[in-house]
Image (cartoon, grey):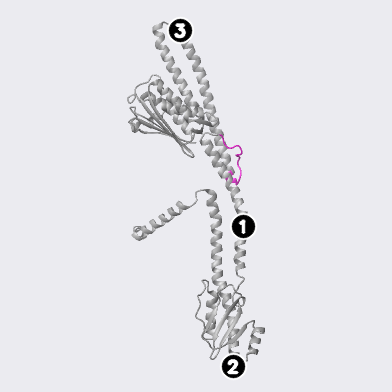
Amino acid sequence: MVSALAKRIWTNPIYQQAKRNWTWFWRLVARYMPKRLYARSLIIVIAPIVLLQSVIALVWMERQWQTVTQRLSESVVRDIAAIVDMVETYPKGDDYGSAIRIAQDRMGLKIDILPPDPLPPPGQKPFFSVLDDALSDQITTRIGRPFWLDTVGNSNMIEIRIKLDDKVLRVFARRSSAYPSNSHQFIVWMVGTSLVLLMIAIPFLRNQIRPILQLAAAAESFGKGRPPPENFRPRGAEEVRRAGLAFIQMRERIERQIEQRTAMLSGVSHDLRTILTRFRLQLALLGKEHAETLNQDVDDMQSMLEAYLAFARGEAAEDTGSFDLESFFEKLEEEAELRGRKIKTSIIGDPEVQVRPDAFSRLLGNIVGNAFRYAPKVDIKAVHSRDKLTVTVDDDGPGIPAEHREDVFRPFYRLDSARNQDSGGTGLGLSIARDIARSHGGDITLDTSPLGGLRAIIRVPA
């Protein structure tokens, strides 16, 4: 029974529409919310204070001001009602000196007796008309005569005119007698105290967020293959310190692993070179017929060994420096001329980029070298924006089928059916290139070129 009711509610169009509206609302909020941690933290701190103060001020103004104003207005109207009774009960012709004196000395009111002229037309009520409403209600209830009042303006006095039988009573009362004029002090104290607290809280909040930003900058630098900031050390709250220590330990483990791998491969290469040297000495003693074939095999082994060492050194430590794309492209143009290839280069943005120069030169050399090897025409376009470098290499060669474009990045993977077998290749060129790109925090992707061949897109932070 319960499941059937829940199912009907779930499938109800009104419920589904409300759910979609709720999801749209939070997506809208997420779109316009600040993206940085410091701004969001400020909102988390400031928003509750502003909301609490707004609710308190609204309730206080609605309840306290209205109650106090009503009581003060009631007291003033009672005094005016007493004067009205005194003027009407004890008339003395045109002499109302005793009433005027009693009103001024005992009640703090200034009164005048005016001729029975018509009352002025009603004026425009102020936007915040608590005083007008309270005085009007009290005069209507306690006096019950036609009246006119003026509370608009910055004057400390309010004017009230009451039409009697044969005269008009004009009363001037202090605004403070009918209205809590010092109520703004509550708002001033509340807002002032909040500002002082925010001025204290914001620097503390900034100090707590700064270690998180430094940790993010250190992780980003390590991901791009750059040295960490010089002043980086774990600081801040305990959780942030633990995250900083974990990052440092992780970086040290990765660096030790890279050093151990490089040292191991260097040792293996030394031993293999010794064996290859003995092979060459022994081949020199053989006949010329057998020596040529065996020498070719030794050269292939040497080439594969050097290529694999280059692949292993792809993540080796190298300081970040300036790399001039324009001068590198000039070298590529010279190489294209020697190989009899057509090349077109273009650079948008600053040609100077901050990368690891040797590694990045090897990356571009491998990509463009493959294009030279299999295509007669190559187009290279570099776009250097504010924080990213994109290099696009197009050729008109045979290309690579879409289903093999990820496989070619695997070490020693060859596409013999798609491209001619090259005795000098080892199948590590693209692997080395992607390894270098990812060590910079970027990547390499392959696509179909508008020229009909292969397009290689290199993206790295710069």
Where residue 244 sits, quadrant-wise, is: top right
Q: Can residue 151 be seen by looking at this rendering?
A: yes
Q: What residue did someone put label 3 on?
A: 284
Q: Amino acid at mark 2?
A: Thr
Q: Amino acid at mark 1?
A: Leu
Residue 191 highlighted magenta (yes or no): no
Distance from the alpha carbon under mark 3 to that under mark 2: 145 Å
Question: x, y percentage for residue 148?
Answer: 53, 81
Mark sitting earlier along the chain (3/2):
2
In this rendering, position of residue 308 left or right of residue 96? left
Q: Residue at x 59, y 43 (%)?
A: 241
Q: What residue did someone put label 2 on?
A: 89
- Depth check, mark 3 against mark 2: the one in front is 2
Q: What residue did someone put label 1 on?
A: 197
Q: Residue at x 45, y 22 (%)?
A: 307
Question: x, y percentage for residue 128?
Answer: 53, 71
**Magenta region, residue range:** 227-240
Is 141 placed above or below 337 here? Answer: below
- Is label 2 in a helix, a strand or a loop? helix
- Is label 1 in a helix, a strand or a loop? helix
Q: Residue at x 58, y 84 (%)?
A: 170
Mark sitting earlier along the chain (3/1):
1
